[in-house]
Image: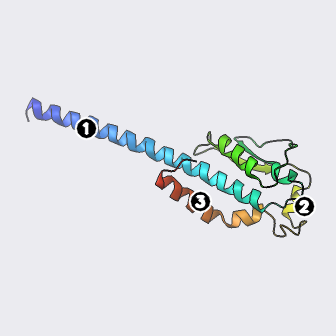
Amino acid sequence: MSLRDTDRKVRKGASFSRQVESFARATKERANEVVRKTALGLLANVVESSPVDTGRFRGNWQVGIGARPSGTTETEDKDGSGVVTAAASQLEAAKLGDTVYLTNNLPYARRLEFGHSAQAPRGMVRVTIANLREILGEAVKGAKEGGGT
């Protein structure tokens, strides 16, 4: 084998190594995107299924990455769009391996989850979790298509 042949093989190896590194980065970013899209999909479903009177309950859904949010807010969000928009911004930092918390700390949240409201007799979180496979499927599809969070 000539020096030229060896040199060419070394360059091809370096190129292959760069291709593998590029693939690994792209795959990791897609996985992170699936995490963000899944969390946002879960939150959007929980918010949408939440009963609404003044909008305070919907306005108190909170997102935390790595730590569970504490306290409540005075936010009233009857249609839930403000909460979902704010969460989308927060979730930009979420990545594979992170624990993402979706919580509502109002004292009556548990009662609402377990049927205290005629608007949501089956709850919000339990109904959403029952649809997890569909939400995850949409997140994966969105990541494959390359859409942003």
Q: Position of residue 1 (x, y in %)?
A: 8, 36
- What SS does tag 1 mark? helix
Q: Relative to residue 82, is residue 107 drawn left or right?
A: right
Q: Based on the displayed image, in which of its 4 quarters is residue 134 positioned? A: bottom right
- Dot 3 crowding, Cα within 10 Å, few <14, some 14–19, many 20+: some
Q: Earlier in the sequence, mark 2 or mark 3?
A: 2
Q: Do the numbered discs 2 and 3 sit on residues whose CB atoms are within 8 Å? A: no
Mark whose residue sits in front, 1 or 2: 2
Residue 107: x percent and y percent? 92, 51
Query: What residue is drawn where x is 84% and y is 45%?
Result: 75
Instruction: Identify which residue, 47 or 136, lies in the foreground.
Output: 47
**Going 10% across and 31% down the picture, which residue do you hit?**
4
Q: Which residue is mark 3?
A: 136
Sequence-wise, the earlier of marks 1 and 2 is 1
Amino acid at dot 1: Gly
Residue 117: numbered disc = none
Disc 1 and disc 2 in contact, CB within 8 angstroms: no
According to the picture, the residue beneath numbered tag 2 turns out to be: 111
Q: Earlier in the sequence, mark 3 or mark 1?
A: 1
* Kind of residue indicated by mark 2: Arg
Q: Residue 92 at what x, y percent from top left?
A: 61, 41
Q: CA distance from mark 3 to mark 1?
A: 37 Å
On screen, residue 78 above or below 75? below
The residue identified by callout 1 is: 13
Left or right: 98 in relation to 117: left
- Whole-angstrom CA distance, mark 2 to mark 3, is 27 Å
Q: Secondary structure at mark 2?
A: helix
- For label 3, the SS is helix
46 and 130: which is toward the camera: 46
Question: What residue sits 42% from the left and 43% below the top?
Answer: 24
Residue neighbourhood size for the residue with mark 2, other residues' Cα within 10 Å, grouped as few (<14), some (14–19), many (≥20): few
